[in-house]
Image (spheres, rainbow, N blue to C red):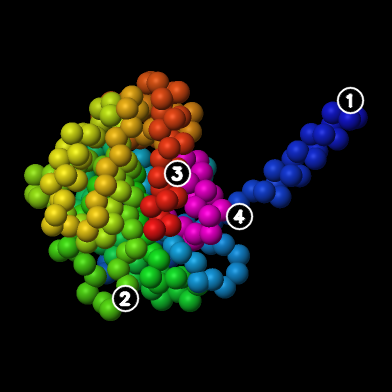
Amino acid sequence: MRLRLTALFVMLVMSAAHAAPAPLAVEIPLASGVLHAQLYKPEGAGPFPTVIALHGCGGLGGHSDSILPRYRDWAERLLRAGNAVLWPDSYGSRELGPQCRVKEMHVKARRERVADIAASRAWLMQQSWVARDRVSLMGWANGASALLWAVRPQSAARDLGPDFRAAVAFYPDCRISAGLGWSTRVPTLVLIGADDDVSSPPACRQMVEGAHGRSALARIVVYPGAYHDFDRANTPLHAAGSNDAGAPERGHLGTNAEARAESQREVAEWLAR
């Protein structure tokens, strides 16, 4: 019994030693109000490559967490690779809860969330620890849809700072962008499951293929047999029509796990370009 307790204590100590630091709450000025965000930053003075990470329609945090486990997992993975990670809270900053089932959304991907991205980038450009030429974007679902609007040539920042280095969009809703003749000014990677019944894999493929020849590099990876939210650990699928982290689950866990592992490799390579 004593040996077993000793072993357990050692495991707990080791786990604590390897635990990622808690995020730092920061406030970013907006034209009308304040954008609250969570920041993960490596130790030291930098400068560090930095990722602006954009939550889905379920929001950034939950009742007891400032950041949901699936986003914390990604933050810790990016942090271990030497990146700082900034998570702007588009809904909480406006005193809104999850927006997945809200018919009349007051925070739109193409409007308020693009403004949040611009404000986050402007704030980062003022931080001494940021590698200003290595700021990238990552987004999930609704956040990925906002990303698609933010990287369009028409949305280029008017200041003289470096543009985004790269962008990664997990299962965005590509239907509007595909119909508008989307293109990107920065290298953009779209990751989606072939069996995603919330977003539209065919629309995303059409959007990316339509941008070839008149755009910066755009690439799409479609994972066979994978569903929506495939990158969230131990979660096969959310209920159809929802990206809410609390929605019921179904789907093929093994297939999603394979897609999740492959997407982690794709993201690492894309951001290291």
Q: Nearer the viewer, residue 111 or 41?
A: 41
Q: Position of residue 151 (x, y in %)?
A: 24, 58
192, above or below 216, in the image? above
The residue indicated by pointer 4 is 21
The residue indicated by pointer 3 is 265
Q: Distance between the residues labelled 3 and 1?
A: 42 Å
Q: Nearer the viewer, residue 222 or 241?
A: 222
Q: Which of 219 and 101 is in front in this view?
A: 219
Magenta stretch, residue numbers: 68-90
118, above or below 246, in the image? below
Q: How far apart are marks 3 and 2 (CA)?
A: 29 Å
**Which label's residue is closer to the chain start, 1 or 2?**
1
Q: What residue type is labelled 2?
A: Gly
Q: Is label 3 or label 1 in front?
A: 3
The residue indicated by pointer 2 is 161
Tag 3: Cα neighbours inside 10 Å, few (<14), some, or many (≥20)? Answer: few
Q: Are marks 3 and 4 in contact (CB under 8 Å)?
A: no
Q: Work out which quarter of the rendered image holds the N terminus and state it.
A: top right
The residue indicated by pointer 1 is 1
Tag 4: Cα neighbours inside 10 Å, few (<14), some, or many (≥20)? Answer: some
